[in-house]
Image (cartoon, rainbow, N blue to C red):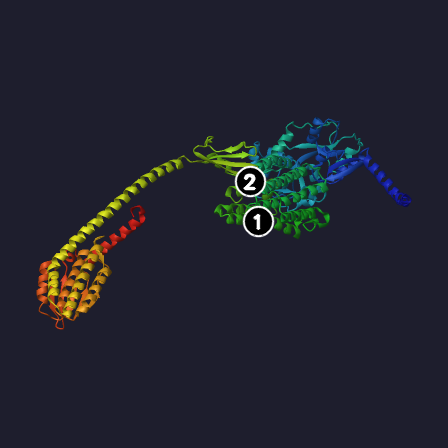
Amino acid sequence: MGRLQRLPLLLALLPALLCTLLLHAAHADALSLAYDRNYGTAYVTILQSTADVPIEAQGYTRRQLELFQDRRVDAAEVYDFQAEQFLRGAAEELYWYPHYTATVVLAVRTDPRIPVHGWADLREGVTIAMPEQSPEREIFFLALTQGLSANRDTAFAHLAQMKAEGRLRFYAMHRGTWGILANAGANDVYVLFAHEAERLIRRGAQLRIVVPAEGTITLTKGVLSRAPITFSETLPKELDAAGYPPLPPSAPTVHAMPPDFPHVLRTVNTRYHAQIMERPAFMPAEAHERFMVLVLMLPLTVIWGAYIYRRVLHHGARRAVVLLIAMLLLWELTRMAKILTFVHDSTLERTLWYLFYMFRAGLSVALLWIAWSADEDAINHRMPPWLKAVFGLNLLLAALILCNDFHQQFFVFTWDNILQEWQEALAWGAYVYWTLWFGEILAALLLLLEKAKQQQVLRPMMMLPFVFFVLFIAYSIAYQYVAWVQWPELTALTALFFLALLEICLHTGLMPSNRLHEAFFTHARLAMRLVNAEGAPVFASALQWDESGRDTRTSRMEIHGGALLWQEDLRLLHERQRQLALACDALERSHSLLRAEHTIRRKLLALTLRRKLSEELEAILAAKRPLLRRFREELMETQDEEKIVRLIRRLNLLSSYLKKRCVLFLKGQEDGTVRTDELAMAVSETCTYLRPLGLRVGVEWTQTELLYTETALALFDAFAEFLTRAAAAGMERIFCRFTDDTLTFLLEDADWIAPWAAAWQEEHGTAVTTEDRGYAHTLTIHPTAAAGKRTGGKAAYAAEDARSTQDEGRRDAPWNG
């Protein structure tokens, strides 16, 4: 049932199918001919009317030979030297039909300001107009250089000067008559073929033809075909009537051209680009030169990319480098395919021209991947999800550029009726795409910079990639507006930019790398080895590995795919340990010896102090023995209790004096000084025992913290003796002042004071002075020890410093304690 329903549809499509087959058969019987439509359709129209086979004329403005070579047409309009090349190297039978001559002539105005009769008249005062299309351009340049000078270098130098002066201009042949005569000047001289000049004159151009007197170049033009064609005998007359000079009947079938004529034309083309257009020699001018540049870029991209891959640290970054290299290679191969593609296949050409956007999408993503993995796990090799989304967005935009429905949002094509060609302009989508693409590259560089800052490796040199990136942006903008910027191959420069950008990032440290790891292993002062999973060394340092390990310590750290081994040389450490052990033994022996010495010194000091104390006590007791004897006699004689109590109190005072003097003596034997507070306690206790005897003493202190032992003892002796005598004399109040090295008493005048002062000064050798101040009497005692030592205060300070130093020494040296 379903098949029956489809039957009416098939019957309706059958007539259309039959018409298509008939048209295809008719089309297949016609002989296809590619002709140069820059010179009009008169020639091909005559061929169609005089040929014995139907001719399908296909007009092109350039590259007709490539169509014939690719077998996309059966015949082509060519020059004789082009036909000769095909006939010499063809493996099949070809047919050459020369029809008319093409003579290089000069076309000047009918009312010229400067008369022109030959090539020599073109040196000064005129402007030469020539076609910009090859091979006519090379043929006309060859005729010009031969006519201007016998030396081709001199002729090209003169033409280059004319180009710089604006007296040499080029016109586009595909624009027709308007293109030739556009911007015409009164002194213009046109170099063209005779039949083309005749065509311009027939169309109303105020020109006349001048055949140079010095000679010119004449070529033959005709049809080169793979199939035989028979033309009518009226062909020469019709060509002559249309302005095409026919060949004479006796002319040879193939025009005799010099064998090196194609080579001469290639030389002329090279010099045209180098001298006339001032294009540097390394800038490709022709399609085959650009193809060679791309061929050289393929191994350069692979080798340089592999070199970068080896120095990249993280596995994810390595995959990103592989992605970048793959995108560059595919871009270069696409560009090569565009150069090699069939000529005049506009669909394929445009597809290949915009296909590189698909590969451009991965370049910025690769940089973002490298930047993201800079501080991530070195083993992680997966692309993060957010980066996959960015990659997908870039591919989507590239696909939209390739689609016909959205292509107009990125690029706008308009037909220029004046220039007779399509004009291309950027639309808003192209600006959005380029902004996004450059923004991704900038984001990658900023991310690398931020991670370098976090890792504290930021350096001023890391700004070089940003400078290089700004230069690439300037180049991309200038490529749209400046002609000479378009001379280098865009694909090659883009590949070099990304490879150089990665190289700069590695050298400046903006991208983590293994750049100096091998040198680190080689020159390390440790014996190091990097081994694989089987334990076989991969890298080893220059130092020899110690297999015995007697004086080394071997450490091991597991890494991905192997391990890192290193040995530390412990010979110096062992030697230092031995020296420290010997020093420790010596110190222990010294400690034991010093401790024993300290014990002996301490015992000796105790014995010495005991002996000195005994001698001091014996001296004091010897001096006090008469007083003690008298006390004993008085105690034995008297029965008065009050007197006995008084005698006992005097004995208590004497015993307190003896006790405190012994204490001060012992305190002062350690370092030769006595603290002021020790003297104050002794004085206070003495005053306590004086009160029961009826004497009250007021004491004022203006002394330093330390006193010499002799000074302190002398002051205490004078204080105790004087007050004991005052108590015996029945005095009630005395004021006393201790200064640094003096003792001053303020009291009422008494007869016993002067005799006591004289006796004390004579007995102890101290300076004792008295003075009557009117309201009271003063007695001042200057101990001899203090006078001999300058001042007791300064000596005490020195002794205090010595004691502090000694205490610190004891704390720092516990073995002496």
Q: Do the CB atoms of the residues marked 1 and 2 lie less than 8 Å apart?
A: no
Residues under labels 1 and 2: Cα distance?
Answer: 20 Å
Residue 48, horizontal then vertical, whole percent: 79, 36
Q: Which of these two is toward me, 604 or 198?
A: 604
Mark 1 and mark 2 lie on one chain; the one further toward the N terminus is: 2
What number is the disc on residue 340? none
**Residue 455 placement (x, y as % from top left):** 51, 47
Q: Which amino acid does label 2 sit on?
A: Val
List x then y, in percent, for residue 518: 50, 35
* Rendered-image quadrant of the N terminus: top right
For numbered disc 2, what is the local secondary structure?
Answer: loop
Q: Which residue is drawn at 72% across and 44% down?
A: 203
Above or below: residue 776 compared with residue 258: below
Q: How crowded is mark 2: few (under 14 residues within 10 Å), some or many (20 or more)?
A: many
Is any part of residue 151 visible from this angle?
Answer: yes
The residue depicted at 55 percent of the width and 40 percent of the height is 312
Left or right position of 629 against 424: left
Left of 729 or right of it: where is 148? Answer: right
Question: Which of the two residues, 647 or 304, is positioned nearer the viewer here?
Answer: 647
Mark 1, residues whose alpha carbon is within 10 Å: few (<14), some, or many (≥20)?
Answer: some
- Dot label at residue 312: 2
Whole-percent x, y for residue 649 in the image: 17, 66
How many marks overall? 2
Q: Is mark 1 on a helix, strand or loop?
A: helix
Please, which residue is most extreme toward the bottom here? 775
Q: Please tell me which residue lies in front, 351 or 668.
A: 668
Q: Is residue 326 above or below residue 791?
A: above
Q: Residue at label 1? A: 442
The answer to whether residue 420 is seen in the rendering is: no
Amino acid found under the numbered disc labelled 1? Leu
Q: Quadrant of residue 58?
A: top right
Disc 1 vs disc 2: which is toward the camera? 2
